[in-house]
Every structure is written in structure tokens, then in C-alpha cells.
Amino acid sequence: MGAVHLLPGTTFSNVAERGDYDSEAEACMTLGELEVWLAAQIIGPYHAERHRGIGIPPALAWAEAMDRRPELVRLPVDRASFLFDFLPCELRAVTPHGIKLFHTHYWDDALSCWYTRPGQTMPIRWDPRDLSRIWLELPHGEHLEVPYRDLRRPAITRWEQKEAVRTLRERGQHAVDETLIFQAVETQRLIVAEAAHKTKAARLALQRTRAALADARRARSSGKPTIEDDRPTAPPGASSTDKSGDRQALPYLVEEMPR
């Protein structure tokens, strides 16, 4: 955090420390750029410098711990499955009309094999950054990607959807449906876009939506990695072999345990 406060645009730890410094005027990094900078700071200088708490550089502590470890470190085999484990889950029925989630209908021809009986439901995974598709969790752990039933609908975030529903109900629209929600989101986006050059809050809202949709697309497009791609590299200064020189001390890709 000490290094973060040296960046232009820092807000400091409190108002007293900030004083007359204009953080907004001095800021020059986007959220995405800050994330990359922070990752480089952690895997570079932070791991190579002496840590006050442990008395040695974290990279050296990692290498020594790996030398002492009797078993290999487990890693997820499938990045997509690893992501699904962290996505929110809802239970929904699968019908000839598709899957209904947050007043929105989703459909894929493959759903015809998974219709539920009356009163039964199946787990549905969804990404709050992009509601344009959901994932039906099948009995053996696989996930079926299901897009909007109406493919003309734009990708929206969960907070845009919630704000649209709240706005409609404030106007007395208690019977909220899919068409009204997307019309409200479109209207809200136009208002925010027009106000973005005027107010800080509007600029932040616009950036939040753009960043969320981009992050969701990037996560989906990553695909399943090869074994070589999924092996992590060593932290700075970490040794790749043990004292005998014939065993890798860093994590191996190992078979995933049964779900």
C-alpha cells in the first residue's frame, strides 16, 4: 500500500494526509491499468525485497516451503470449471420455454434434453458482470452455456438490471417484464452517456459497466488452457529444483479431485 500511495491520483489514507492534493485531477490510470500495475508490483519488487514480518524475501520463503513440502500443490485442471465455482448459483426450472432468471428468458436447443418435472429445479450459474448468458449445471458437473432467448438483447450487468427493475417499480410498474427491463436499461445508458462529461458519478458508472462487460468477455474467451499454459512460473528468485536437482519445487498440474 505504501507504493500505491506514490501513484498519481492517490487518495491517501485519510483526508488529513491528502490535504489540498487534488486526487481526481492528478489521476491518470484506468482501473485495468491499476490492476496490471499492482500485479507487477506484487510479483516483482514485493516478492524480491525483505519482508518485515518473516525477515526474508517472500520469494525465498516460497522456495524453502516448496522444498519442505512432501506432496505436490494441486491446481485446477480446467480454468472454466474453476471460474464456475465462484459464480453465483440459483435454482431454476427448465421448461419448453427455456430458463427464466431475473425476469429474462434464456434458451438453447440442447435444453430439450434437460426439461425438469413440475416442482423440480436445476442449478444455474450466472455472471453478474454480464447477464447475456447463463450456465446450466448438469448432473455430472459439466456446464451448458445458454444465451438470451431473444439474441437481439444487449449484454447488461446485474446492477443495471436491478436498477432498471427498481426504477420501473417506483413508476408503478409492478408487473415488470423482460421488454420493459431492457427498455429501461437502454434509457439509463443514454442518460449516463450524456451526463458522463458533466458529473464524476456518471463517469464512474459508465466505466464500471464497460469494465465489467470486458472482464466477463475476457473470462469466457480464455478457454481451456493447455498443460503448458496452466503451469505457473516461479516467483522472482525462487528455485525450480530441490537440493538434489531432479525435482521441480513449484506446483505441478495434477488431476482434479471428483466434484
Image (cartoon, rainbow, N blue to C red):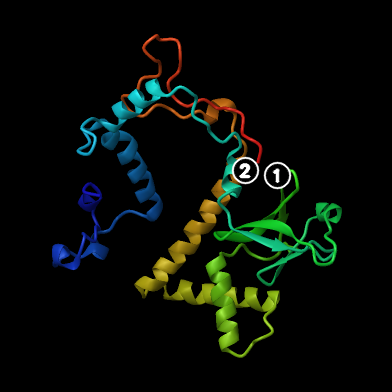
The quarter holding residue 124 reads bottom right
Label 2 sits on residue:
81
**Residue drawn at 40 percent across, 10 percent down:** 245
> Contact (CB < 8 A) between labels 1 and 2?
yes
Image coords of residue 73 (percent x, y) = 49, 29
Considering only vertical position in the picture, is 76 above or below 211? above
Which mark lies nearer to you, 1 or 2?
A: 1
**Residue drawn at 49 percent across, 77 percent down:** 191
Label 1 sits on residue:
141
Between 13 and 256, the one nearer to me in the picture: 256
Label 2 neighbour load within 10 Å: few <14, some 14-19, many 20+: some
Q: Earlier in the sequence, mark 1 or mark 2?
A: 2
Give the SS element for disc 2. Answer: helix
Q: Amino acid at mark 2?
A: Ser
Considering only vertical position in the picture, is 150 above or below 58? below
Badge number at residue 108: none
Looking at the rendered image, the quarter that the C terminus falls into is top right
* Position of residue 94 in the picture relative to residue 4 (left or right): right
Give the SS element for disc 1. Answer: loop
